[in-house]
Amino acid sequence: MRPILMKGHERPLTFLKYNRDGDLLFSCAKDHTPTVWFADNGERLGTYRGHNGAVWCCDVSRDSTRLITGSADQSAKLWDVQTGTQLFTFNFDSPARAVDFSVGDKLAVITTDPFMGLTSAIHVKRIAADPDDQIGESVLVLKGPQGRINRAVWGPLNKTIISAGEDAVVRIWDTETGKLLQENEKEIGHKKTITSLAKSTDGSHFLTGSLDKSAKLWDIRTLTLIKTYVTERPVNAVAMSPLLNHVVLGGGQDASAVTTTDHRAGKFEAKFYDKVLQEEIGGVKGHFGPINALAFNPDGKSFSSGGEDGYVRLHHFDPDYFKIPSI
């Protein structure tokens, strides 16, 4: 399995996202310029220019026409995927962190960081079908969590929003009333910052990765802890195979500690775990720095990883990967 090396970013990667068809891969990095690539051969298709700070997160609409990005320049932008033109800018008073389109793409959730005395918040915006009708007002603003909210995603039927972040608590919010419905139990939850969150293809469960060197699988409706995957380094990124019972974790040390170790000792590999048995089944090495982003192609036949080293590595699985014995 030879990876395709995709070099287009000057700075560390922050996020990767495939479109629903699996033919495009969107990458975000700290270099202000989200980029779109062909997912089969890793060819760069184009960039989205306009942000003035690190871009933390993106999401693409179901029909691959709209892209939304959240950036440290205190804005979230809507883009036309095909032409790269900016359609709208949502301005905030603090950096925008996580973005996620709802099922149906009529709503988007955007989280903002604590900044200059402001607390972190979760904003719900209505997304107009025609960009000319787009307005910046929030339908709902949720506050409460302490510290940064690193991820916020929509729950089943857009009835809930699931958020997680620096305070290591997973929360479920009601999207109609804005009420906090559930928090995970302290004993079973993460002990340190939750860095990443990935939903299963069917939306019935989700995976969280944390700096406490573990990833946890949760039921999306009841917030029951299903599985825990323990690794030996902080987890920066998580992904779930849509095809097999595999979970991938990526991480490494903090960027500040990287120079103190040899890259081979840095354990910068994407680790594969059996989703059910919670055992490590393999790893994919290659990055010269911590892995900050992971994404599975919707067909489950390839995955990509983005690192602190500024590279996106695209891996198409060999046939024997699909023969890994599973219970």
Image (cartoon, helix red, strand yellow):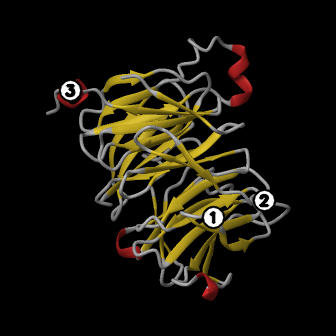
Which amino acid type is marked by label 3?
Ile
- The answer to whether residue 93 is above or below residue 240 is below
What is the spatial separation of the Cα atoms under label 3 and label 1, in whole angstroms?
A: 39 Å
Amino acid type, callout 1: Thr
Q: Which residue is mark 2?
A: 73
Residue of label 3: 324
Q: Which residue is mark 1?
A: 111
Quadrant assignment for the N terminus: top left
Residue 275 spot, x, y in % from top left: 28, 38
Q: Is residue 130 left or right of residue 115?
A: left
| Relative vertical location of residue 219 with respect to residue 268 in this rendering, above or below | below
**Mark 1 → mark 2, Cα distance in angstroms:** 13 Å
Q: Is residue 199 visible?
A: yes
Label 1 crowd bin: few (<14), some (14–19), many (20+), radius 10 Å: many
For label 2, the crowd category at 10 Å Cα-Cα, with few meaning under 14, some 14 to 19 and many 20 or more, is some
Considering depth in this image, is 56 or 257 the residue closer to the camera? 56
